Amino acid sequence: MDRYVITISRQYCAGGKKVGKLLAEELGINCYDSEMFQLVSRAENMQSDMVAHDDRIKDTSLFDVAKEMYKDTSLPDSTTEDTLLLRNLYDYQSHIIVELANRESCIIVGRCANYILKTRPDVINVFIHAPIGFRLKRASSIHNMPENELRNYLAKVDERKADYYLNYTGCEWMDVSNYDLSLDAGKLGIRGCVDMIRKFIEIK
């Protein structure tokens, strides 16, 4: 494939974001994650042009596309928990994702990108999962809480991911039929997941 988009959906603390970042470095393309999309989805950030100076975003197509979209769209305040505003945010981010796919090869982590780009032949959709022990070990380096609380926290984060995905796509987040590859980071490791995706790109 000369040009492609890789979408990565992942269980919390399964290493999906790290896989995306490492893969992007090796392929020489950009990796856009949920935090980056949230930055360009806040009206106050775009109004102040704050994202233009963020090292993760400046000089990327994400900034260019978001700036163009912001001029053409009434971007709601993303801190408001209103259903209509959240729907507008989803539509706004969806337009950005489609335009990014039109412009460059890239990796998109989260944001229902696999569903948004489902009709495109140049997209590879990946789901990264891992056993609870693997995820707890990774999560313990981020969150300082007892194991039982951490276990519950992981479950709640994944529940929110599943609810978000179902709400906007009507599909089950962990249904493997939504993905080209389903990779167990606990068995493969981060390096192994990167290698598997690279091999799949060569095959496709």
Image (cartoon, grey):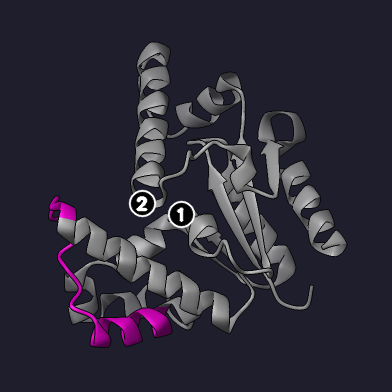
Q: Residue at x 25, y 87 (%)?
A: 71
The residue pinned by badge 1 equals 112
Give the answer, above or below, for where 16 lies relative to 104. above
The residue pinned by badge 2 equals 168
Side of 120 relative to 112 (left or right): right
Nearer the observer: mark 1 or 2; the answer is 2
Q: Position of residue 83 (x, y in %)?
A: 17, 52
Picture quadrant where residue 76 is located: bottom left
Asked whether 185 falls inside the magenta stretch, the response is: no
Residue 190 seen from this side:
yes
Label 1 neighbour load within 10 Å: few <14, some 14-19, many 20+: many
Residue type for callout 1: Cys
Side of 128 relative to 143 (left or right): right
Q: Position of residue 49 (x, y in %)?
A: 25, 81
Q: Residue at x 61, y 41 (%)?
A: 128
Residue type for callout 2: Tyr
Asked whether 67 falls inside the magenta stretch, the response is: yes
Secondary structure at numbered mark 1? loop
Label 2 neighbour load within 10 Å: few <14, some 14-19, many 20+: some
Picture quadrant where residue 42 is located: bottom left
Give the answer, above or below, for where 38 lies relative to 169. below
Q: Position of residue 158 (x, y in %)?
A: 42, 33
Secondary structure at numbered mark 2? helix
Nearer-N-terminus badge (1/2): 1
Query: Mark 1 and 2 residues: CB-CB less than 8 Å, in contact?
Result: yes
Which portion, as a residue range, is magenta?
63-83
